[in-house]
Amino acid sequence: MSWDIVIGIETHVQLTTQTKIFSGAPTSFGMPANENACLVSLAYPGTLPVLNKEAVKKAIKFGLAVNADIAEHSVFARKNYFYPDLPKGYQISQFELPVVNNGFLTIGDNKKIRILRAHLEEDAGKSVHGILNNQTGIDLNRAGTPLLEIVTEPDMNSAQEAIAYAKKLHNLVQWIGVCDGNMQEGSFRCDVNVSVKPSGSDKLGTRREIKNLNSFRNMEQAINFEVNWQIEQLEDGNEIVQSTVLFNPDNGETRAMRSKEEANDYRYFPDPDLLPLKITQEDIDDIRLTLGQLPEESIKKLVEDFKLNDADASIITTNKQTYEFFQSLISEGLDPKITANWIVVNLFAKLNDNELSINQSPINKDQFVLLIRRIMDKTISNNAAKKIFDLLWDDPKVDVDQSIESLGLKQVSDASAILPLVQEVIAHNQAMVEQFKSGKDKAFNALVGQVMKLSKGKANPGQVSELLKGELDKV
Amino acid sequence: MKNLSLKELNLGLSSKKFSSEELTRFFLNEIKTFNPKINAFITLDEEKSLQQARDADKRISQDNMNELTGIPIAQKDIFCAKGWKTTCGSKMLDNFYSPYDSKVIELFNQSGAVNLGKTNMDEFAMGSSNETSYYGKVRNPWNLDYVPGGSSGGSAAAVASGMAPAATATDTGGSIRQPASLCGLTGLKPTYGLVSRFGMIAFASSLDQAGPIAKSAEDCALMLKVMAAHDTRDSTSIKQNIPDYLKSLDNPIKGKTIGLPKEFFNDDLNQEVKIVLEQVIDSYQKMGVNFKEISLSNSHLSIPVYYVIAPAEASSNLSRYDGVKFGYRAKEFKDLEEMYLKTREQGFGEEVKRRILVGTYVLSAGYYDAYYLKAQKIRRLIADDFKNAFKECDLILAPSCPSTAFKIGDKTEDPVSMYMQDMYTISTNLAGLPAISSPAGFINKMPVGFQLIGNYFDEATILNFTHQYQRITDWHQKTPEAAV
């Protein structure tokens, strides 16, 4: 029996505001425990929430970026439950009337993933287990950090699609400057709802929710494990029980939480301490002006303006830093295609090997520009450039021109210098010349290789081909 | 000094007849004499009070004083005051010393008033008799066997017995007006949003509002002038020009109209209270005020609506008292859940637990629509009734309470009859309107008040009308010397 996989994702995106969503306490990460816990964070008697407008602006910005409706009127509600790291005994969230509704993102080959809603809420603190005589401590630094919870429809049908959506979202929220995207620090966390149903069936299966996935690798493993587990259960004639599960990265498995851990009636009701959130068309228009060019439009521009192919354009828009890096290189007058190729092939290979982001690249931009310029003006070949690029990676002080000199990588484009080499190769490789004459194209490449070898790699391969063709014609 | 008005105290201070320190010592002495019998104060801190008094004297000597500088004011123990034990009448906060000032305390401090002490109250302001306080019941200065009303019973008893010239209070369903009525005082609940709730420990956030309990409308006007201020730390605080309530006290009221809700003046109204109210109407008529029957057709739903909304909000507001961060924590427990259960079981009193249970129930899945949502809809209808009524009149006159004070213990076994105490006051909280209770006479030697309800932010008119009534009557000047 074959099965359809159905996946919906809820993402908690930490908004990059200076202060918390309902107080003036800072949101800085990595502070000593409770350093950022003000009286509001601690839920002291008599304290009241005051909405941080920056958080609202960022929510609207996100809504606009995913073509969503921005609610004129939305409401903050209390989600009531007891937990030591939830200082008020309730979380201020949005329930019935969220600020963002009905947006979408596209993945892969133009598949639309519908975004049902995105709502503002406050983060909880953290329980720190096993400190001071094995007791549990509470760190409320994170309590009150603004979150945007982004909820999709169950529109994804494989782990690959789920990852593609999550990556696209991850790029977008950073691109528009609403989230730092730091998954290790918990700035971007996904809950993934997974169900399976017999292929083609209209009826959705019972879902299980995998909580708090904070890397794409974990997400992929967790979904795959969960899908296989559910299919196994169903094929064994068991029923899936709706539940919340946790992923254990150590063994790659998901495990249902105890029913007690999830048996909550949250008793949502509108928070009487906060007025309904009113957003005017004017507010929306103002924020639209700050939105800038989005990744999708950037891809289009790369293809139209610079004739890049879709694949390269997509990679260059993986994140805003790469796109801006590319643009800054082009503004130096570099050839777009050569530049794109160098970023996509060489720079990204190095970054990936070393698990670095573009921000952490050790490459000196000025020297990188010079390197590409030297390819463009045919001073060096692409292969020679790679050698220098390796040097640049290891030592940002390396000077491109000096290295070309000292390594003798200067390309020979002078016909009078290359011609004798071509003639020499023809003279010494009669067998290959014969093969070429009898129609074997491969032999031509071999002859080019010989000339290059003879030039110690310095001859301009294009020119070699040209001269070789001419000389072979004469034979 | 005992029965002087705030204005007279101000005059005494500014003319150096007495210093703030002398005045403060006088009231602290009165408290020493009478508080053991009345139990109006939970916390006193002589040193802090006297320090403030000396600071005020310095201000006075520098001619830098305003109406309340140097005057001791009793503060309901619901207002967080920096360095003061702030209990809200609960064991849960018996060890809680506030690290910050509420907006109300901040405003009194800025004006140079002296914090005389923190007054007793029903636990978390839940009650109408001041019998639910962890710190013991408060007695009515007019007869020590009777309740002073609640939840601001301590504030009312303190002022009525002359232990304080005036006091702050809060009103969620009648907690300023009912004790004012039962103790022969003037108590004003302002429009929701006029006085900041920042630092005022929450009972039911959409209903809670702070105001004064004092001996006269004039004193209330002075107090309100200090308390009313926009506050960015309270999102429900409304930006509003604060008029000088004193200036309008003597505005002419002739030719104005007071509405009489037919739903309040029906057969259910206590006959003795009715007679008193008729005398009030007569007094106003003599001053040229017209009366008109109006209708508040949904007012009979106020109590059930209130007892859905207020407990719902309270059940959530009181979740923070879990033993984790501050306040009471049970001594022994084997795990987290038991810590929660024992802390809340031991830290809260019966009435608070009853309301948490009710509130939790009405918000639960499956009951929310039938109770909470429906109550909110009716709340809107109740507010609309008033809106329509104010098209026909300037103010509305109503009873403050169904009766005079009742005996201690009389209603403790019957919560619903206790809840009925607020039948005439609750609808204004639901609508967010301002209202005052002013003394109007006595029934069997116990004071009784009447209520004037105004339109939004029309405290000036309420105080104006009350002051004019108090100019031609002396009920508000009666003091319970005999009882004390």
Image (tube, coloured by chain):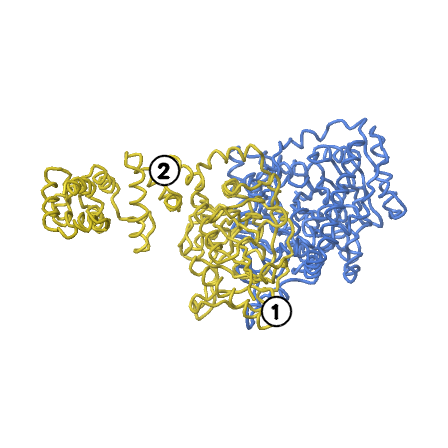
Q: Residues within 10 Å of mark 1 (few under 14, many from 20)?
A: few
Q: Which chain is blue?
A: B
Q: CA distance from mark 2 to mark 1?
A: 53 Å
Residue A309 position within the rendered picture, expressed as x and y whole percent measured from the top left: 37, 42
SS at mark 1 in the image = loop
Q: Name the quadrant of the N terminus of chain A.
A: bottom right
Determine which quarter of the picture holds residue A43. Answer: bottom right
The residue depicted at 70 percent of the width and 36 percent of the height is: B456
Q: Is residue A450 visible?
A: yes
Q: Amino acid at mark 2?
A: Lys
- Say which residue label 2 marks: A307
Task: Identify which residue, A251 or B42, lies in the foreground.
Answer: A251
Q: Do discs 2 and 1 belong to a common subunit?
A: yes
- Say which residue label 1 marks: A239
Residue B398, disc? none
Q: Amino acid at mark 1?
A: Glu
Q: Earlier in the sequence, mark 2 or mark 1?
A: 1
Q: Is residue B165 visible?
A: no
Q: Name the quadrant of the C terminus of chain A.
A: top left
For discs 2 and 1, the disc positioned in front in the rendered view: 2
The residue depicted at 10 percent of the width and 40 percent of the height is: A417
Task: Identify which residue, A464 or B435, lies in the foreground.
Answer: A464
Residue B137 position within the rendered picture, expressed as x and y whole percent measured from the top left: 70, 58
What chain does badge 2 belong to? A
Residue A117 position within the rendered picture, expressed as x and y whole percent measured from the top left: 57, 47
In the rendered image of the structure, the colour used to display chain A is yellow
